[in-house]
Image: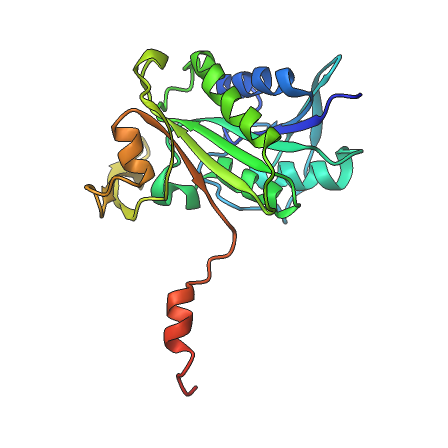
Amino acid sequence: MERPLIFVTNDDGVGASGLRTMIDVARKVGRVIVVAPEDAQSGMSHAITMTRPLYLRRVREEEGLEVYACAGTPVDCVKLAFDYLLKEEPALILSGVNHGSNSAVSVLYSGTMAAAIEGSSYGIPSIGFSVTDHDPTADFGDYRDYIGRIVDQVMAATITLPFCLNVNIPNVSPAEIAGIRACRQARGFWREEFEKRCDPRGRDYFWLTGSFQNMEPDAQDTDEWALQHNYISVVPIQVDLTSYPQLERIGDWRF
């Protein structure tokens, strides 16, 4: 029987070291096709390209592996792959491994998770993986076993579609990881700060900085708590943003 097809993408770009780890894990499961952005696309969320052409470049091809670079966003990569490149439906979509956390509200800004969410909208089980290490040269190979365990669990499980997981791994050695926890997204927000600077030509510009504010630091069922206590967090997410409690409250309003 032919091995299953696994589709892989990311937002850090086709040359990112985290992508190499993701490919290594995927190749143990099946045949792999990769479409990743030509350059880093962090923070692009669900953006798509509409005002310029998209270019697709073959980077690598060998038995059981094809790698392409797309001159677009992570979601462009998924859309282009499904509309043009893929000749069969993949069994699983993997996005990452992202350099930096995508826990809590960061999931809304993440290109990594947007690609996974886009994939799940096609009815394909999808997983986004991130490590809380922003170093672009970081080697995530030590986490292959943990990533593989989660991938194997999804491949073997009977799941209800759409299905998408947001997996975040703490930046500690594998020996220090306390385990894997299914949990919920923490409530919080980013307190942005725009640092005003001056370029060599005397023009003012602004550089985005800031910090995450956890609104429930003592809650022990969230992804933020899990990461702070060296657990790998696994959060099932969905596209439906409807607030059902608020929907009930406004149901009797007279518009």
Q: Residue furthest left?
A: 218
Which residue lies at the image location 49% right of the left edge and 20% below the top edge?
Answer: 18
Q: Quadrant of residue 235?
A: top left
Residue 93 visible in the shown view: yes
In the depicted structure, whether residue 92 falls above or below residue 196: above
Which residue lies at the image location 43% right of the left edge and 46% below the top edge?
Answer: 108
Q: Please state if 207 lies on the left or on the right of 216 as rendered.
A: right
Model colouring: rainbow
Residue 13 visible in the shown view: no
Q: Position of residue 22 (x, y in %)?
A: 55, 21
Between 211 and 113, the one nearer to me in the picture: 113
Which residue lies at the image location 78% right of the left edge and 34% below the top edge?
Answer: 88
Q: Please state if 150 lies on the left or on the right of 93 as rendered.
A: left
Please count the marks in the image: 0
Q: Where's the C terminus, which quadrant? A: bottom left
Q: Position of residue 77 (x, y in %)?
A: 63, 36
Q: Please state if 3 lies on the left or on the right of 26 as rendered.
A: right
Q: Where's the N terminus, which quadrant? A: top right
Which residue lies at the image location 59% right of the left edge and 41% below the top edge?
Answer: 159
Between 68 and 53, the one nearer to me in the picture: 68
Between 203 and 83, the one nearer to me in the picture: 83
In the depicted structure, whether residue 31 falls above or below residue 181: above
In the depicted structure, whether residue 108 falls above or below residue 92: below
In the depicted structure, whether residue 236 falls above or below residue 6: below
Q: Position of residue 32 (x, y in %)?
A: 68, 22
Q: Residue furthest bottom?
A: 254
Q: Position of residue 236 (x, y in %)?
A: 46, 42
Q: Quadrant of residue 15?
A: top right
